[in-house]
């Protein structure tokens, strides 16, 4: 059983980030826990195709495993560099700094 096989791998990562902001101004929408919440979601998909050599039936497992590992490393890197860093920038830009919050005490 020698020759070559064509492998196609489709992968999708779904990312959901829930951010809860405390010390919100009176009258703003809050989550069930009484905190203001922001939900950001995104997905990243990739399809890869390779033609790899096989010498025996167990080579299929090795080839598929290697493809999965390669795509996982690439998608994790893309997710971290693109999505997570950009989301952090956006959240930092829209979230009020502690010094800009005004607190009103009772009494």
Image (cartoon, rainbow, N blue to C red):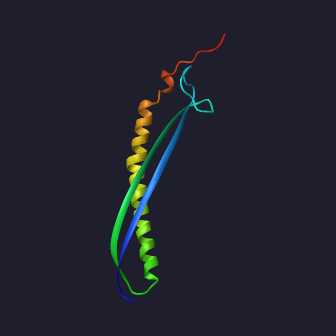
Q: Is the N terminus in the top left, top right, bottom left or bottom right quadrant?
A: bottom left
Nearer to us in this view, 16 or 75? 16
In this rendering, the answer to whether 95 lies above or below 25 is below
Question: Measured from the top left, where is residue 2 in percent x and y?
Answer: 37, 88
Left or right? Give the position of 72 relative to 105.
left
**From this viewpoint, which residue is outermost toward the right?**
107
Q: Residue at x 47, y 52 (%)?
A: 14
Left or right? Give the position of 97 relative to 23.
left
Q: Is the C terminus in the top left, top right, bottom left or bottom right quadrant?
A: top right
Which quadrant of the view contains residue 47?
bottom left
Which quadrant of the view contains residue 72?
bottom left
**From this viewpoint, which residue is outermost toward the top?**
107
Which quadrant of the view contains residue 52?
bottom left
Left or right? Give the position of 66 relative to 37.
left
Q: Residue at x 39, y 42 (%)?
A: 86
In this rendering, the answer to whether 89 lies above or below 13 is above
Question: Measured from the top left, where is residue 84 in percent x and y?
Answer: 43, 46
Nearer to us in this view, 63 or 81? 63
Question: Measured from the top left, where is residue 3 in percent x and y?
Answer: 34, 86
Q: Residue at x 40, y 63 (%)?
A: 10
Question: Measured from the top left, where is residue 54 in percent x and y?
Answer: 38, 83
Q: Residue at x 57, y 25 (%)?
A: 23
For the image, the number of numbered tags is 0
């Amino acid at each position: 059983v020698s020759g070559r096989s064509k492998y196609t791998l489709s992968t999708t990562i779904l990312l959901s980030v829930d951010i809860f902001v405390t010390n919100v101004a009176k009258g703003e929408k809050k989550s069930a826990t009484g905190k203001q919440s922001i939900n950001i979601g995104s997905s990243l998909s990739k399809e890869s195709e390779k033609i790899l050599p096989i010498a025996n039936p167990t080579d299929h497992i090795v080839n598929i495993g290697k493809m999965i590992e390669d795509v996982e490393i690439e998608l994790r890197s893309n997710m971290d560099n693109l999505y997570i860093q950009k989301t952090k920038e956006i959240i930092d830009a829209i979230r009020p700094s502690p010094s800009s919050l005004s607190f009103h005490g009772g009494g």
